[in-house]
Image (cartoon, rainbow, N blue to C red):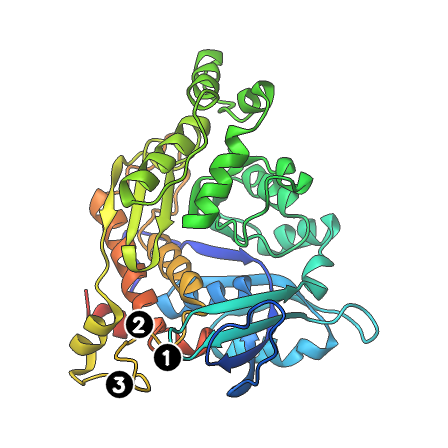
Amino acid sequence: MAHDSAVSQPVRVLCLGSLNIDDVYQVNDIVRPGQTITTLRHTVSAGGKGANQAVALARSGALVSLAGKVGADGRWLIEKLQGLGVGIDLVEVLDEGQESTGRAIIQVARTSGQNCILLHPGANHAISAANLEHIMNTFQPRPGDLLLLQNEISMMPEALTLGRSHDLTVVWNPAPALTIADDHAQAFDLDAVDLIVVNEDEATVLYEQLRQREPNQQAAAGTTQGSKKDRELARDQLTPCPPLDPKTPDDFLAVAEKLHQALPDLSGVVITMGANGVVYHFKSGRKYGTRLEGHYQAPSPASLLGHHCHTRLNNEGNGSAVIDTTGAGDTWVGFFVGYLSQHTPATERAQPIELPSRTLATAIRVASIAAGLSVTKPGAMDSMPNWEEVERLL
């Protein structure tokens, strides 16, 4: 994708996240407690939410630098990422005898394409405050640059705060979701976040975390730029809300609205719902001033492939185009952020940017098409489409 001609210096994306070695096992069905099964196939591939999203960003045409850590056993990951167009200068390789590279044990069901994942953090949890400062000093943020974060590395609360202090547009994909009982979850300064992208489970957990805050914590979550009345209003609107059990797109749109009420600086919330599409809620916040909300029902993977290659699918007899959902969420996030990064002015600004609503709507559509294509192939990184494949379906 070509960068906007009006942008003198292209917006960059710093993706600070995990790098994993994925052990992927194909099974007939996901194993149940107490059950022993034989796998159909075993493959080893590159993964981690940070690495996956960085590859999706690169595939979308964005300028992306990945920051993180791997063990001595993960040097091949860096070579692979570099070959896929990801900037890897900020990925540190630990010495022999230190932490090994993070690992993911992934089961993929042959019949449905659904997965189940067990994570070992490894080097992803060896990131320190000094590492964060070094990353920022080396990256040297420019006006308009974005910071993309997930939940698979250490020092996440500090990374959020540091991103805001450098005036980066902070995009947070809080995956995997932290539980309500996790004290670590309470350390996150959510006021530092500009855009939140979550799935249904993550949206529900995030809402509950905010809902159960003490009133003084909720007040502190209000904008530092707004008035005391604004912060009290945000607190009062969230505190009396009963627990939610969202099921439908309308339910999740209400969740997105409540998140905005609690976090006045937030510019946008996107909730991905798999086959049920995407709900989105944008309002005037710290970075963006565009107001837009709604539900986008993405085309099915089968219809995308049918339009893309005009061939009939036969996924090992199950009649579905879905082969493997691993990495679909990361593909969505990467293409969404990548599209925004290429359509956002890289200029100093005192007021929020008024992005055309069409830009946001197109970013959502682009991401949905990319994710839909990704589930029609096995793997995470290797299943991600390139920009030309997505563009043909716009």
Which amino acid type corresponds to the residue marked 1 in the rendered image?
Lys
Residue displayed at 19% across by 84% down: 312
Residue 105 appears in view: yes
> Horizontal placement of 290 versus 198: left or right?
left
Work out which residue is located at the far front of the displayed protein and give it.
34
Q: Count neighbours of disc 1 (C-alpha within 10 A) and say few if under 14, some if 14 to 19, many if 20 or more.
A: some
- Residue at the spot of label 3: 314
Q: Are marks 2 and 1 in contact (CB under 8 Å)?
A: yes
User: Between marks 3 and 1, how big is the CA–CA gap?
Assistant: 12 Å
Q: Please give the name of the residue rendered at 74% of the width and 59% of the height, measured from the top-left corner.
A: 126
Question: Which one is in front in this view, the residue at disc 3 or the one at disc 1?
Answer: 3
For image coordinates 27% across by 60% down, the residue present is 366
Q: Secondary structure at mark 2?
A: helix
Q: How many marks?
A: 3
Within 10 Å of the Cα at label 3, are there few (<14), some (14-19), or many (20+) other Cα atoms?
few
Residue for badge 1: 377
Type of amino acid under label 3? Asn
The x and y percentages for residue 224 are 52, 23
N-terminal of the pair, mark 3 or mark 1, is: 3
Q: Residues within 10 Å of mark 2 (few under 14, many from 20)?
A: many
| The C terminus lies in quadrant | bottom left
Could you say which is closer to the camera, residue 323 or residue 367? 323
Q: Is residue 173 left or right of residue 304?
A: right
